[in-house]
């Protein structure tokens, strides 16, 4: 039985969505068509977002004009669920720095900064390490790259494996730190404690005993940041190629 909070939904199911590449194009805003479809879906089931980015960025991307993420989604999870809201109310949070401690963090970030300085790529911008509540995000080009610059980096990275080589070194060097290094987006990778991947958000929904939990994501392959939740026995995983594909699959699956 789900709680009274969701008594108005005829199907006792939860449908969770990755953000970049699933609900919207990478770093772009959700379209009016997607918003309209999600509103229809929400009449039948409970819905939520589970993004890797911090809450401000997830909120920017999925809030349609004149509304906001907390009004449109029953659950809003940012940083894989480290920042979590249920029906507009914030749930307890955990932090990366508490987990790792200042000394280990300093050793890790100093190594990363040296490695970043030695990487030779065509252009570099700013904000190479972003310190978040539940993770750090590391970008060889820098998070202030423009949209065209990020697409150029993505192509360059496909050929030269800049991020792949970087995380390989980090995994070896910091094998005793209990950390996961995940390449999720276009220009960066995330570093967070083992188990604090997108499956983390499932802890926040366990009390509702949903009959089914569906997850839609585009990076569902091994090494992608949707892989763990996509393959988790608690979810029914759906792999999509882009937001248009998400809409197509939703229409078929939920008869919308
Ligand atoms: O949600 C996927 C990823 O989106 C961003 O990645 P990038 O800027 O590299 O495209 C980041 O917010 C990252 O943390 C996140 O996993």
Image (cartoon, grey):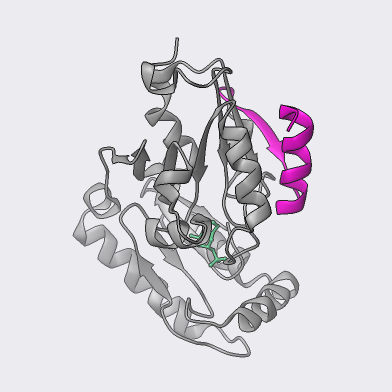
Q: Which residues are magenta?
A: 233-256
Q: Position of residue 30 (x, y in %)?
A: 59, 58
Q: Position of residue 65 (x, y in %)?
A: 50, 61
Which residue occupies the foreground of this view, 6 or 108? 6
> Would you say residue 234 sits in the magenta stretch?
yes
Q: Quadrant of the N terminus?
A: top left
The residue that appears at 50% across and 18% down in the rendered structure is: 210
Q: Position of residue 215 (x, y in %)?
A: 61, 35
Which residue occupies the foreground of this view, 238 or 46? 46
Which residue occupies the foreground of this view, 66 or 45? 66
The residue that appears at 70% across and 36% down in the rendered structure is: 238
The residue that appears at 22% across and 50% down in the rendered structure is: 98
Q: Position of residue 174 (x, y in %)?
A: 41, 56
Q: Quadrant of residue 137?
A: bottom left
Which residue occupies the foreground of this view, 96 or 244? 244
* Residue 164 visible in rendering: yes
């Amino acid at each position: 039985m789900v709680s009274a909070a969701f008594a108005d939904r005829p199907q006792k199911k939860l449908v969770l969505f990755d953000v970049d590449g699933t609900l919207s194009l990478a770093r772009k805003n959700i379209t009016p068509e997607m918003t309209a479809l999600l509103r229809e879906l929400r009449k039948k089931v409970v819905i939520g977002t589970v993004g890797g980015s911090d809450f401000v960025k997830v909120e920017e991307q999925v809030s349609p004009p004149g509304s906001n993420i907390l009004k449109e989604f029953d659950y809003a999870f940012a940083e894989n669920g480290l920042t979590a809201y249920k029906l507009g109310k914030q749930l307890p949070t955990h932090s990366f720095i508490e987990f790792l401690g200042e000394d280990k963090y300093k050793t890790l970030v100093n190594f990363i900064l040296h490695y970043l300085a030695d990487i030779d790529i065509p252009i570099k911008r700013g904000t190479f390490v972003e310190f978040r509540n539940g993770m750090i995000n590391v970008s060889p080009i820098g998070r202030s790259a423009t949209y065209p610059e990020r697409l150029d980096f993505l192509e360059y990275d496909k050929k030269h494996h800049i991020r792949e080589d970087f995380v390989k070194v980090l995994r070896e060097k910091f094998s005793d730190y209990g950390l996961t290094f995940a390449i999720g987006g276009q220009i960066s990778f995330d570093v967070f404690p083992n188990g604090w991947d997108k499956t983390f958000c499932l802890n926040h929904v366990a009390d509702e005993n949903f009959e089914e939990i569906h997850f839609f994501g585009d990076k569902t392959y091994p090494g992608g940041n949707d892989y763990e939740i996509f393959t988790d026995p608690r979810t029914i995983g759906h792999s999509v190629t882009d937001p248009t594909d998400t809409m197509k699959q939703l229409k078929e699956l939920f008869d919308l």
